[in-house]
Every structure is written in structure tokens, then in C-alpha cells.
Amino acid sequence: MYYSLWRQDDNGNRFLVGDFPDRSAAEARLAELTRSLHKQAYWISETGTESREVQPPHERPPHYPDKDPS
């Protein structure tokens, strides 16, 4: 299992911030991001039941779950 950190901007667009191998790593990144004066909505979701290679956020391609890929 791994943990995904998500962000929702002021316009309602949702973005994957990154995947983390454990919840404490995701919570640490969440704490860093919420220190900013510009508040956005963040949440952590448990993702997957099988292990996979988790890439740091800057190495992952953008992911837009609410956008139509066509």
C-alpha cells in the first residue's frame, strides 16, 4: 500500500502532489505545504494494495484525475 497526497486549488481542480511509501511521509509533506499563507485543500488517500515503485513528485508526469483525457 502507498499513500497519495492530493491538492485542490481555488477553482476546484485536483492535482496529485505525490505518492509516498508510508503515511508519515505523506503527512510530513502535507505539513510543509500547509505552512504557506495561501491555503488550499489537501488530503491523503490510501492507494493500492500491492507494492509498487513510488517516484518522488518531481519525477512523475502530471496527473489530472478530473480532466477528460481526450
Image: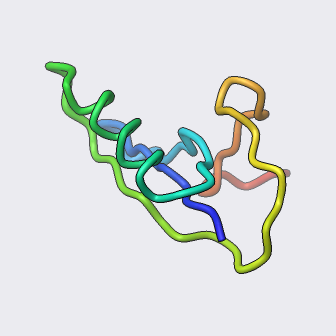
Could you tell whether 13 is left or right of 58 in the image?
left
Q: Residue 52: x percent and y percent?
A: 82, 60
Q: Residue at x 55, y 60 (%)?
A: 3
* Residue 59: quadrant of the picture: top right
Could you tell whether 21 is left or right of 39 in the image?
right
Closest to the observer, 38 or 27? 27
User: Quarter holding the N terminus?
Assistant: bottom right
Location of residue 40 with respect to 59 vertically, above or below: below
* Residue 39: quadrant of the picture: top left
Q: Residue at x 85, y 51 (%)?
A: 70
Location of residue 9 with respect to 52 vertically, above or below: above
- Outermost residue toward the left? 37
Q: Residue 27: x percent and y percent?
A: 36, 48
Could you tell whether 15 is left or right of 19 in the image?
left
Q: Which color mode does the image show?
A: rainbow
- Outermost residue toward the top? 37
Closest to the observer, 36 or 32? 32
Q: Residue 47: x percent and y percent?
A: 62, 70
Location of residue 32 with respect to 40 vertically, above or below: above
Q: Residue at x 62, y 48 (%)?
A: 19
Q: Residue 68: x percent and y percent?
A: 73, 55
Give the number of marks.
Answer: 0
- Outermost residue toward the bottom? 49
Location of residue 7 with respect to 68 vertically, above or below: above
Q: Residue at x 70, y 74 (%)?
A: 48
